[in-house]
Image (cartoon, rainbow, N blue to C red):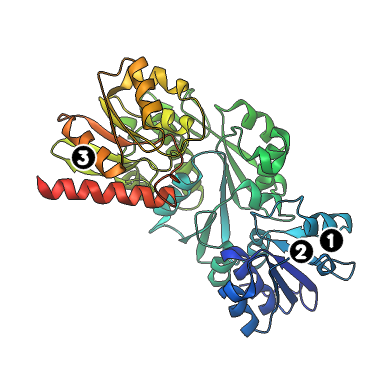
Amino acid sequence: MKLVNKFKDKKVLVLGLAKSGTEAAKLLNHLGAQVTVNDRKPYEENEQAKELEKEGIEVVCGSHPEELVSEELNYLVKNPGVRYDHPLVAKAKGLNIPIYTEVELAYLISEAEMIGITGSNGKTTTTTYVGEMLKGGRRNPLIAGNIGKVACKVAREATPKDEMVVELSSFQLMGTETFAPKIAVLLNFVEAHLDYHGSMDDYIEAKSHIFRNQTSGDYLIYNADDPLVSKVVKEAKAQLIPFSVEKNLENGACLSEGWLTVFNEKLIQAKDMSLPGDHNVANALAAAAAAILGGADIEQIRHVLKTFEGVEHRLQFIGDVEGRKVYNNSKATNVPATITALKAFNQPVVLIAGGLDRGLSFDALKPLLSEKVSALITYGETKDKLAETGRQSGVPFVDSADTLNEATSKAYSCSNKGDVILLSPACASWDQFKTFEERGKAFTEQVELIKQQK
């Protein structure tokens, strides 16, 4: 890691712990800063605070005393989940104290070049794709960021022989000042996190931090099919590399006569991809362009496109059961995500849906239910509402269950060879599970049990 002197002997407040705040505090302490951490969880319950205190870092827990922010403070590093209208953040902003997220720290210390990936949808799949494609190439890939591995921790261990592939949320990017990845990927914009950002314009501005500091020696891979993306990248100084599933491109990545084509080289036919759906073709094109620019081997890219099983709980192929292909899309916690999943398949779909009732309508599902779904099994709080939506849509077979396990068994029982069995709930998981990951794991385990019984 680069031993930067920017923070030496400076007073830094780390606001909010969790994984990113904890690792940021450790790094700043290592760089010689005078670090104070502040977290709302009481000290008695706060193992991370106790761990940091043992390293000589001052900890303040249980509340957010206003006096922690004063003119003597040099920097505030906040957990990405802490909003900018938080009293301490707002006070720091009023005093013109620089406010960072740990991604800025990672960039400052990293000896490895970075590939940064952002967008409203598809970040995790594209990041994972790139990481797999880079294996065996010019540099060793290190996955980090919003995907679960704290960027500044990974950066501490990175060398010039590595390449950091970093998934970036709008929350993380908003807290950067000099961050400039060698390769940036901007996938798409849809309305998201407006409760945090306040407006769509502010959300787009936060995402745009991924390319703001890039120069003509850097690359920006962008979605030429997204009008908002295409508009905002006109401000970029980096070399623009478009990708598209709708039009042929002379430079960049596109779907040409059924082939995934990147920099005028045909990789594989779309029908041979392991992941279904146009959205995954788009993700794959963006990933392949980034991987090639990052020094990947072309044959490795082709291999990944044909074999990649997807990210856990995100339209993840979990196996073939007696001729039925089974997919875990537990991450689909809303109707638009389930619509995207259904669009990915051309075979009859046995859909499992249900979960927490937020009082929302499911009417937007009706066209896809009519077109794609041969059977609908609903469960949880929304089972009756979803079942009625299915009947109104003319789904040939509709049934309900109390639990996901029961719904999974019913889905298999009413399926036929050649069908897709898809868990894509269109609802949050909190009526029966703590997280969508827990829900997806329960589904996978039930499918495995059905397999064993056959």
Task: Choose between 353 and 93: the one closer to the eye.
Answer: 353
- Residue occupying the point 51% across, 31% down: 359
Q: Quadrant of residue 256?
A: top left
* Image position, residue 331 (x, y; %): 43, 43
Q: Quadrant of residue 223?
A: top right
In the rendered structure, the answer to whether residue 169 lies left or right of residue 293 reads right
Is label 3 in a helix, a strand or a loop? helix
Task: Choose between 283 and 240: the one closer to the eye.
Answer: 283
- The alpha-carbon separation of the residues under discs 1 and 2 comes to 7 Å
Is label 1 in a helix, a strand or a loop? loop
**Can you identify the residue that label 3 sits on?**
409
Marks 1/2 in contact by CB < 8 Å: the verdict is yes
* Image position, residue 140 (x, y; %): 45, 62
**Can you identify the residue that label 1 sits on?**
97
* Image position, residue 315 (x, y; %): 36, 40
Among numbered discs 1 and 2, the one appearing first in the sequence: 2
In the rendered structure, the answer to whether residue 435 lies left or right of residue 418 reads right
Quadrant of the frame with the N terminus: bottom right
Among numbered discs 1 and 3, the one appearing first in the sequence: 1
**Can you identify the residue that label 2 sits on?**
76
Mark 3 surroundings: few (<14), some (14-19) or many (≥20) residues within 10 A: some
- The alpha-carbon separation of the residues under discs 3 and 2 comes to 52 Å
Amino acid type for the residue under numbered disc 3: Ser
- Residue occupying the point 37% across, 38% down: 380
- In this view of the protein, can residue 223 be seen by the observer? yes
Marker count (numbered): 3
